[in-house]
Image (spheres, helix red, strand yellow):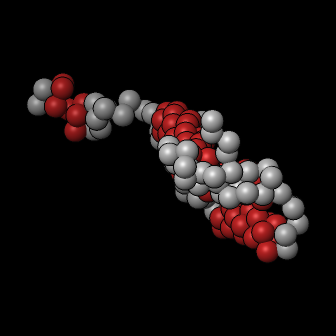
Amino acid sequence: MSDHHANTAHGADDGHHGHEVHVDHGSLKTYAIGFILSVILTAIPFWLVMGKVINNSSTTAFVILGFAAVQIVVHMIYFLHMNTKSEGGWSMLALVFTIMVVVIMLVGSIWVMYHLNTNMMPHMADPTGEMLMPSANPAVTPHMNHK
């Protein structure tokens, strides 16, 4: 038998080179902490909406988005076990990518909804209370003085 074959047979040249990969699959304690945090991060926004705690609806929406972002991070840490040490840092890269995608989706959704509301819904009343009907024909809008 050759030396190469003898080394391979004993596992000396199997490509691992003595590096041990430790994957943390979590324990009952970490799953319980993640579950409790998830329930709290769901119950608080529910209470804010149902109890009408914050009068301004846009402020409530931003608070709920904040809770949603925190809950995503909790799920990634406690249930997906993402940290800087596992899988040679690829987990952290996935976390950064996920955060970027979530921010783009949240900001983009708010931007689209705001502009749809602003541009697609005609303002039906002017400050004097008269009804405004958008039209290019001055005869259709009698409240305006066209001379």
Q: Is residue 46 left or right of residue 89?
A: right
Q: How many marks?
A: 0
Image quadrant of residue 28?
A: bottom right
Q: Is 108 rendered above or below residue 13?
A: below
Q: Quadrant of the N terminus?
A: top left
Residue 89 lies, in percent from the top left, at 52, 33
Residue furthest bottom as drawn? 50
Residue furthest top as drawn? 3
Residue at 55% of width from left, 49% of height from top?
139
Q: Is residue 12 visible?
A: yes
Residue at 55% of width from left, 44% of height from top?
138
Q: Is residue 19 left or right of residue 70?
A: left
Residue at 88% of width from left, 66% of height from top?
53
Residue 39 lies, in percent from the top left, at 72, 69
Residue 85 lies, in percent from the top left, at 58, 37
Residue 111 lies, in percent from the top left, at 59, 42
Q: Nearer the viewer, residue 112 or 90?
A: 112
Q: Nearer the viewer, residue 115 or 52?
A: 115
Residue furthest front as drawn? 147
Q: Nearer the viewer, residue 54 or 117?
A: 117
Residue at 87% of width from left, 61% of height from top?
54
Image quadrant of residue 147?
A: top right
Q: Is residue 109 visible?
A: no
Q: Is 103 rendered above or below residue 32?
A: above
